[in-house]
């Protein structure tokens, strides 16, 4: 038996987000995680049986940012 949980409908609920269909990145600027419903946004699932690759994915994203930053050189605009 397979159990599938659809996450997308939860990410578009009016009770969690105002105007969920609009693309508004600024809604996350003052987002208070402590007051939010823990199941309102769960890219890696939540609870006891969450994604086992969660920490690997977060580590990989940090490594990609580091690899990109290593390719750039910082220069001073002051003489």
Image (cartoon, helix red, strand yellow):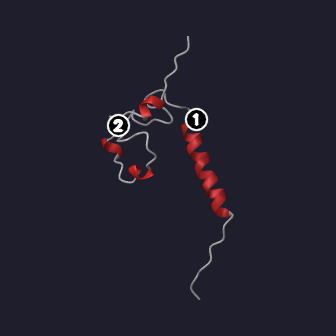
Q: Earlier in the sequence, mark 2 or mark 1?
A: 2
Q: Give the structural element (helix, strand or loop) at label 2.
A: loop
Mark nearest the camera among 2 and 1 is 2
Quadrant position of the N terminus in the picture: top right
In this view, the residue in front, 39 or 25, is: 25
Quadrant position of the C terminus in the picture: bottom right
- Which residue lies at the image location 65% right of the left edge and 59% below the top edge? 68
Against 47, residue 60 (above or below) is: below
The dot on residue 77 is none
Residues at marks 2 and 1, CA–CA distance in whole angstroms: 26 Å
- Which residue lies at the image location 58% right of the left edge and 82% below the top edge? 77
The dot on residue 16 is 2
* Percent position of residue 6, x then y: 49, 25
Q: Give the structural element (helix, strand or loop) at label 1.
A: loop
Q: How crowded is mark 1: few (under 14 residues within 10 Å), some or many (20 or more)?
A: few
Q: How crowded is mark 2: few (under 14 residues within 10 Å), some or many (20 or more)?
A: some
Farthest left residue in view = 35
In the picture, measured across the screen, residue 25 lies left or right of residue 51, that is left
Against 59, residue 38 (above or below) is: above
Q: Name the residue under label 1.
A: 53
* Percent position of residue 42, x then y: 46, 35
- Determine contact: label 2, label 1, CB under 8 Å: no
Farthest bottom residue in view = 79
- Name which quarter of the figure residue 10 lies in: top left
In this view, the residue in front, 30 or 14, is: 14
* Percent position of residue 74, x then y: 62, 73
Against 6, residue 53 (above or below) is: below
């Amino acid at each position: 038996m397979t159990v599938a949980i659809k996450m997308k409908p939860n990410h578009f609920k009016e009770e969690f987000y105002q105007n969920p269909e609009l693309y508004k990145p600024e809604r996350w600027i003052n987002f208070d995680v402590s007051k939010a419903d823990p199941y309102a946004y769960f890219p890696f699932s939540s609870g006891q049986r969450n994604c086992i690759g969660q920490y690997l994915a977060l580590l990989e994203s940090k490594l990609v940012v580091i690899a990109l930053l290593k390719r750039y050189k910082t220069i001073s605009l002051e003489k």
